[in-house]
Amino acid sequence: MTIYVGMDGSEGAAAAARWAVREGQLRQIPVTAVVAWDYLNQAASRGHEEFDPEYSEEDALGLLRAWLVSAVGSAAADTVGRLSVCDLTWRALTAVSVEADLLVVGARGTGGFLGLRIGSVSERVLEHASCPVAVIHVDTRQQGASVAERIVVGVDGSATSSRALAWALDEARARQAQVHLVSAWSVPIMVYPGAMEGANIFEGAATEVLHAAVRDADVHGLTHPIKSETVAGGAASALIDAANDATLLVVGSRGLSRARELVFGSVSRQVVHHAPCPVVVIQPDRRDTP
């Protein structure tokens, strides 16, 4: 098992590489950098108009090495594996996710690792990846051991949010961080016009979900007690606010179809775009799905 990080020469990819290297050190997991290319999208030729008919995997690997050295330094770069894939970027990253513990991408890659438009590389990766996906912003603060770390997790009672909590607890053990659970609630006025009078019912349900999550959490090895809170409002805004000054925000993807996401929006999509810290999206367990 390994951590894969997508690289394309952008500042976002460099930030992702730095984050991935530290994550590998914390988890004691090897890191492999991935570059995707094809004959009409030659990585080494970006910024040049010339087409090189003899462009090869070795050329892409050479450029990947240079990107790594620039991002993390030569000593750290020598500890990172390198993989060149002749394919579309989203397909290359999705393919390696099958055997990965974690896939790391930059928030603003030249290949659109995190484009806002539907159909971008990031949208496809987040939709199809088989492992957790970490999205790293360029201005991510690199926190050291002397800085208190906090990991925010969204919980809503779903199976995927339970998996997100389990992942966050493992991460907290590695980082000696505190886990902060957030359960958001709101009154569905459009569904139930008189619901404002019974708002305590919805708050109570969120509180019950939160208590169950805390009760069932594996706290073995944690260095800090779990913090938890219910928040009135939308889940995305509650998580983004809670993640201010956090080390990491972990959310579960419900695996909604793209058509439903277009209508209702996606909490994971919103936090990926707007969170003030790195975000890890936990995918549905597709490996066990026929």
Image: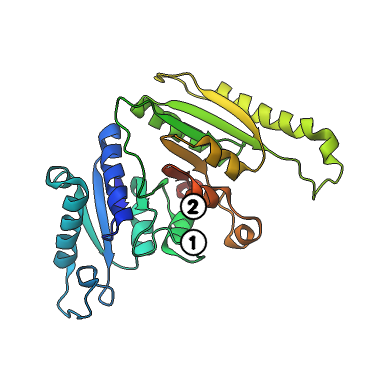
CA neighbours of label 1 inside 10 A, class few (<14), some (14 to 19), many (20+) = some
- The label on residue 273 is 2
Could you tell me which secondary element the residue under label 1 belongs to? loop
Q: Could you tell me residue 9's position as x and y percent? A: 26, 60
Could you tell me which secondary element the residue under label 2 belongs to? helix
Q: Could you tell me residue 110's position as x and y percent? A: 33, 64
Residue nearer the viewer, 144 or 290: 144
Q: How many marks?
A: 2
Residue nearer the viewer, 51 or 130: 51
Residue contact at pointers 2 and 1, CB within 8 angstroms: yes
Q: Amino acid at mark 2?
A: His
Q: Residue at x 14, y 61 (%)?
A: 62
Q: Amino acid at mark 1?
A: Leu
Residue holding disc 1: 116
Q: Is residue 8 left or right of residue 257?
A: left
Q: Could you tell me residue 231's position as x and y percent? A: 64, 33
CA neighbours of label 2 inside 10 A, class few (<14), some (14 to 19), many (20+) = some
Mark pair 2, 1: CA separation: 8 Å
